[in-house]
Image (cartoon, rainbow, N blue to C red):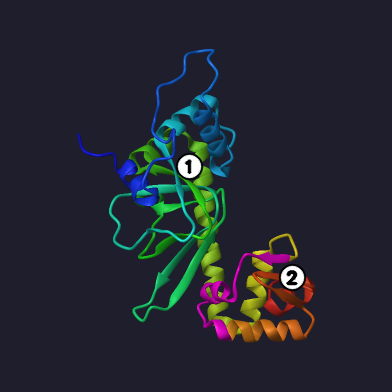
């Protein structure tokens, strides 16, 4: 029997499967759920695209996924990987980036827990010659193409949510391209800080190099621009922590409506 491609992927990532990662027999009716089952279902049910599904539907998805741990700093997807898999990020952050022939790095996206990514043509979802690296210790669920297709056909709600998410990503890509073409660096840095801060007032966990990689520029250029914003009293800079002191002004500089 040929090896399970998801098992092979899990071994590549961690050297071993997380206990309970492979499908197990269903518990008897009325029996308490095993710890691995309860944990895995809990992770999956927290995914936005899987919310509101019945327990039976969640059990079917649970059986179709492999749960793996990936240590911080590990590059677990590289250009040229074969086979279509979908990653569901449960814990930690993942950086998707590309490299120029000269070795310059451009960060495409930093993914937060609760998102999905991977090489999956039936979703119009591709890695497009990019790398995936775990920025933190990550917990990831992996699904094969066949299981994703079965999920989409049996759960229209999930298919609709995935379409909404993919449309949102296209709009974000278009916005970043417009900023790159039409805005100067100060406006792009201000826009990035406001975006990364979300509803809060701090950007946490990003070095100057991380910000430069997201903008496609040199670290020294970003450091200089951040220094100018700090001198104007708009931000406060600490180690991997930037506090937005005047979000209104930063939004104005970014050119956002």
Region in magenta: 202-220
Label 2: state its secondary structure: strand
Residue 106 is left or right of residue 232, and the answer is: left
Do we see residue 174 in this rendering? yes
Residue 178 is left or right of residue 251, and the answer is: left
Crowding around mark 1 (Cα neighbors within 10 Å: few <14, some 14 to 19, many 20+) is some
Crowding around mark 2 (Cα neighbors within 10 Å: few <14, some 14 to 19, many 20+) is some
Q: Residue 65: name its quadrant.
A: top left
Q: Quadrant of the N terminus?
A: top left
In this view, the residue in front, 240 or 159, is 240
Label 1: state its secondary structure: helix
Question: x%, y% of residue 153?
Answer: 41, 35
Question: Any mark on residue 72, and which?
Answer: none
Q: Quadrant of the C terminus?
A: bottom right
Lower position in the chain sequence, tag 2 or tag 1 = 1
Task: Residue at 51%, 43% (x, y): give it.
Answer: 160
Q: Mark 2 — residue?
A: 243
Q: Residue 81: name its quadrant.
A: bottom left
Relative to 213, is 95 above or below? Answer: above
Q: Give the foreground label among 2 and 1.
A: 2
Relative to 93, is 34 above or below? Answer: above
In this view, the residue in front, 168 or 41, is 41
How many badges with numbers are in the image? 2
Question: x%, y% of residue 6?
Answer: 34, 42
In this view, the residue in front, 31 or 151, is 31
Residue 131 is left or right of residue 203, and the answer is: left
Relative to 250, is 228 above or below? Answer: below
Q: CA distance from mark 2 to mark 1?
A: 38 Å
Question: x%, y% of residue 212?
Answer: 55, 77
In this view, the residue farthest toward the front is 15
Q: Mark 1 — residue?
A: 159
Task: Residue at 51%, 35% (x, y): give it.
Answer: 40
């Amino acid at each position: 029997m040929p090896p399970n491609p998801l098992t092979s992927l899990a071994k590549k990532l961690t050297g071993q499967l997380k206990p309970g990662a492979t499908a197990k027999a269903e518990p008897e009716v009325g029996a308490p759920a095993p710890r691995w089952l309860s944990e895995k279902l809990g992770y999956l049910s927290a995914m936005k695209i899987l919310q509101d599904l019945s327990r039976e539907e969640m059990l079917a998805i649970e059986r179709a996924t492999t749960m793996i741990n990936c240590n911080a700093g590990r590059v677990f997807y590289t250009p040229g990987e074969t086979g279509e898999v979908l990653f569901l990020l449960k814990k930690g952050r993942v950086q998707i980036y590309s490299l120029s022939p000269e070795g310059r790095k451009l960060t495409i996206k930093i993914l937060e827990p609760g998102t999905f990514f991977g090489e999956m043509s039936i979703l119009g979802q591709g890695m497009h010659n990019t790398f995936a690296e775990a920025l933190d210790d990550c917990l990831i669920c992996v699904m094969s193409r066949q299981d994703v297709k079965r999920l989409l056909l049996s759960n229209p709600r999930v298919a609709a949510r995935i379409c909404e998410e993919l449309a949102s990503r296209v709009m974000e890509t278009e916005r970043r391209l417009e900023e790159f073409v039409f805005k100067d660096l100060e406006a792009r840095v201000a826009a990035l800080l406001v975006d990364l801060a979300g509803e809060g007032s701090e950007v946490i966990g990003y070095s100057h190099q991380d910000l430069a990689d997201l903008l496609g520029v040199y670290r020294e250029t970003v450091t200089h621009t951040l220094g100018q914003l700090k001198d104007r009293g708009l931000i406060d800079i600490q180690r991997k922590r930037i506090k937005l002191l005047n979000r209104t002004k930063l939004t104005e500089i970014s050119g956002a409506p």
